[in-house]
Amino acid sequence: MTYLDATAKFYTEVAETPQIGLCCVQSSPLQLPGLKIPTQMQEMNYGCGTTVHPTELANDPTVLYVGVGGGLEALQFAYFSRRQGSVIAIDPVTAMRDAAMRNLELAAQENVWFDRSFVEIRAGDAFALPVPDASVDVVAQNCLFNIFKPADLQLALREAWRVLKPNGRLLMSDPIATRPIPAHLQSDERLRAMCLSGAMLYEQYIEHLVAAGFGQVEIRARRPYRMLNRQNYGLETHLLLESLDSVAFKTPIPEDGACIFTGKTAIYTGMESYFDDRAGHILQQGVPAAVCDKTAANLANLHPAEIFVTDSTWHYNGGGCC
């Protein structure tokens, strides 16, 4: 049995018998006016963060949700795109698709605005998405891609890139590791299916996104997720996993490399009213401007006496001059 077979078996089990708190982080679920989430759907919230960012969901986007889970985020996406077939949710596990369908029927009873036709559930997996090229505005996945081994992860990311329209967005939430996860944990197929042993380092995660063709990545949130303690997991010291929410844009990669936004700002401290680096970045005196990590490094290296660069906040919602 491969690790993907083990994953399918595990999620069949948790679809049939929900495991409350399997993946969830200790934070309040997204609250939206007029949205009621059925109890069973909430109990099947098998995610490590959120992919539902209202600022990314203007103009009734068509959303492809990979790994339907209990249907919670599919319902939340439908809240923003209230039309037939606006959300396509796929999952290779029959029991999970069936559970999501039941939960969405309950949601239709509890939410007067929600029509069951808003969400279409299809059989399929991340490696062969059942939609045409450049056909959706948003692809989203929550706590799924971390399960994949590197070659499969790259295939899944390239599939997401294929089906997105130009300037489309990949919304992701996954665990990352603060140091490499030992081989004996990576090879444990059940721990991998539980989103505990497949996490890679932040730098590796971003490298995979860029390698798949995404020219801009924005970090929405980074927070503690789980602690693997040394006693239970055979480690020399405890190993912290973090949850990373990100948005990757299907835009061309600039010649000098992709733009990665982690919440850094650049502040001009000189005597003039503004600073122009002649590369598209104009900084007002004393006013923090959000910049990508690449630009932050360039400004700090080339103009250390005049430019102050703040640390990453790991929370970025647009703006700035990049």
Image (cartoon, rainbow, N blue to C red):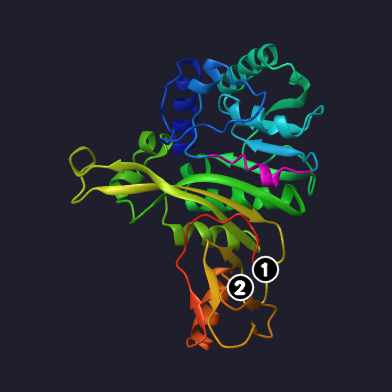
Q: Residue at x 62, y 87 (%)?
A: 272
Q: Residue at x 55, y 20 (%)?
A: 41
Magenta span: chief secondary structure: loop
Q: Residue at x 48, y 86 (%)?
A: 304
Name the one closer to the observer, 290 or 217. Answer: 290
Is 64 within the magenta?
no
Label 1 element class: loop
Q: Amino acid at mark 2?
A: Gly
- Residue 177 as seen in the image, left or right of residue 89: left
Name the one closer to the observer, 188 or 103. Answer: 103
Magenta part of the chain: 50-58
Tell whether label 1 touches label 2 (CB within 8 Å): yes
Seen in the picture, residue 102 relative to 249 is either above or below; the reply is above
Q: Is residue 220 visible?
A: yes
Seen in the picture, residue 79 relative to 113 is either above or below; the reply is below
Which residue corresponds to mark 1?
253
- Residue 148 as seen in the image, left or right of residue 98: left
Image coordinates of residue 208 in percent, x first then y, are 54, 58
- Numbered circle sitting on residue 257: 2
Residue 103 placement: quadrant: top right
Residue 126 placement: quadrant: top right
Q: Amino acid at mark 1?
A: Ile
Name the one closer to the observer, 41 or 182. Answer: 41
Q: Is residue 88 visible?
A: no
